[in-house]
Every structure is written in structure tokens, then in C-alpha cells.
Amino acid sequence: MVDRKNPGNPEGEVSSATKRNRLALIKSAQEVLAEIGPDATVEQFVAHAGVSPTTIYNHFYNKEALFKEALAHAWKEWINWAHGGIPADDSLETMIDVCRKLFRVAKTHPEFSRLISKSLNSPGFVIEAVKADGLSAMKSFARQGHVNKADFEKRVRLFSYCIAGILHGVHTTNELSPADADASLGIALTIWGLSPESAHSIVSRPLSTFL
């Protein structure tokens, strides 16, 4: 099958070009998120990316969809590094270790830190963009009895906003040190029915593979 507008190009080449253009938009969106945040206008984005508004809508439903995918893409890349090859739902302790690495991401991934910092001005945007991986893991922990599964959706929402608030304090307002964030995370973990002692034990684990 060929491109009707250009019969000389097989479908595979058209798909490859489309993929490259989409990835270029995602990269530009990540840069805009790091500089301005999710409240950036279409006009600001197209000025930065050097494209027309139509180009966005050729690949994404709207600007918000583009920005969410841009953050999700950066998030997945960072998560792969943070997990170091360990499955995301391997254990609650592993997931919390990864969360604690987020508190220290300015040291390991400064560009990603800038993106997170600006994006957290709209916590709902961040939660919606990255919730898939964390939600899957928490469902697994609930099935295994590691966390309280009663009112699961409510606990997920409350815990998500707690994490977003802690990250905002670390990366956006600089009100919290990573150690302060660890302690706050320990408190947030009690949302899942963990005892304060168990939660403290988890957030006090050495991050031996952090650097």
C-alpha cells in the first residue's frame, strides 16, 4: 500500500516519518513544560517548536493531550532508570524507593527535575499523565493484601495528591528537603493502612543503588 499523496513512498516510510514528527512534537512539548508548564498556550508552543497549530492537531486531539503524552513519555524513561530493571509491581518497598528517588531527581536528572517542577503547578495534570503505572502497582499490592483495599479509589486519589504535594514542596517551592519528603511520605503511607512504624521503616531504607 502506498501514500496516495506520494505514490512513490510505501506505507512503512510514511509511518516512520509520522512517528518522527510525533516524537519531535513530544520533545518540544517537554521543553515547553520545563520552561513554562502545562498552562503554556498553543501560541507559546508553536513559537517554540516552529510549527503551525495544525501540526499539533494532525497528531494529537489537542494541546492538553500532547502535553500529557510528553510528560508520560519522560516519566516512563525516568521510571525505567529508577527501577533498574526491577518490575514496577515487584514490591511495595521497591515502589517507595522509586518514589524517594523522585525527591532526589534534581541531582540525577536535572532536566527531568525542571519538567516536574513546572508541571507540578497543576498537580491534577501530573497525576492524570503518570497514574497508569502507579495504579497498576497499587492494585497488585491490594490484591496481595499488602495495602488496605477498602475504598481503593478514594485512597488512590488521596495518596496521589499527597505525593504531588510533597514533590511540589521539594521541586517547586523548595520548602522540603529530600529527608523531609521521606518523612512526609511515611505519613502518607498510613493512608494505605500501614502502621506508622512500618511506614517509617520503609521510607528509612538505604537507597544503596541511588547513584
Image (tube, grey):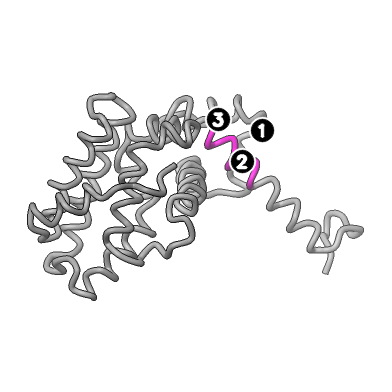
C-alpha span from label 3 to label 1: 9 Å
C-alpha span from label 2 to label 3: 10 Å
Query: In the rendered structure, which segment of residues is drawn in magenta?
Result: 23-31
Q: Main secondary structure of the magenta part?
A: helix
Residue 45: numbered disc: 3
Depth check, mark 1 against mark 2: the one in front is 2
Q: In the rendered structure, are the residues bearing label 3 and label 1 in contact, judged by CB atoms less than 8 Å apart?
A: no
Q: In the rendered structure, are the residues bearing label 2 and label 3 in contact, judged by CB atoms less than 8 Å apart?
A: no
Q: Is residue 199 left or right of residue 136?
A: left
Amino acid type of the residue tagged 3 in the rendering: Phe
The relative height of residue 169 versus residue 97 in the rendered view (above or below) is above
Would residue 62 be seen by someone viewing this image from the given angle?
Answer: no
Residue 25: numbered disc: 2
Disc 1 is placed on an element classified as: loop
Relative image position of residue 33 (x, y in whole percent):
47, 32
Relative image position of residue 211 (x, y in whole percent):
44, 42
Assess whether residue 29 is covered by the magenta stretch: yes
